[in-house]
Image: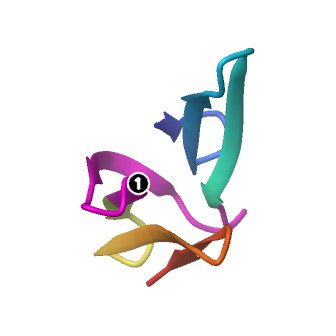
Amino acid sequence: YYDANRGALKYAYYDGFGWQITDVDYDKNSNLGKYCSLAFAGDDRPHISYADESGKRVKYAHISGGSWETS
């Protein structure tokens, strides 16, 4: 989801005990995460596309090796 207070993209999931929230992409000088779209591929891992309004482009994030990778 888009965190408007920080201009960041976050991912929330329920682990069976409570909600866990992680930063996916954040840059204090950018506005990242608006217009995000979430999908789960065959590997059951989250894949997210979202806007980088400062750079005027679409970005992509996915879990790789236990951490978020963005491009």
- Residue situated in front as seen by the camera: 3 or 55: 3
- Residue situated in front as seen by the camera: 51 or 1: 1
Q: Position of 61 compared to 68: left or right?
A: left
Q: Position of 52 compared to 12: left or right?
A: left
Q: Residue at x 55, y 42 (%)?
A: 11
Find residue 19 and report its horizontal and vertical position in percent.
68, 21
Give the residues drawn in magenta, as a range: 26-48
Q: Which residue is drawn at 74% across and 15% down?
A: 17
Find residue 37 and report its horizontal and vertical position in percent.
26, 48
Q: What element carries label 1?
A: strand
Image position of 35 with respect to 65: above or below:
above
- Residue situated in front as seen by the camera: 58 or 61: 61
Q: Which amino acid does label 1 sit on?
A: Pro
Q: Residue at x 36, y 73 (%)?
A: 59
**Outermost residue toward the bottom in this view:** 71
Magenta stretch containing residue 35, yes or no? yes
Q: Residues within 10 Å of mark 1 (few under 14, many from 20)?
A: some
Magenta stretch containing residue 13, yes or no? no
In what quadrant of the picture does the C terminus appear? Answer: bottom left
Find residue 21 and report its horizontal and vertical position in percent.
69, 35
How are the residues colored? rainbow
Q: Which residue is drawn at 72% across and 16% down?
A: 18
- Residue situated in front as seen by the camera: 6 or 65: 65
Q: How many labels does the image show?
A: 1
Q: Quadrant of residue 26?
A: bottom right
Q: Position of 4 compared to 27: left or right?
A: left
Image position of 37 with respect to 55: above or below:
above
Find residue 39 and report its horizontal and vertical position in percent.
26, 50
Residue, disc 1: 46
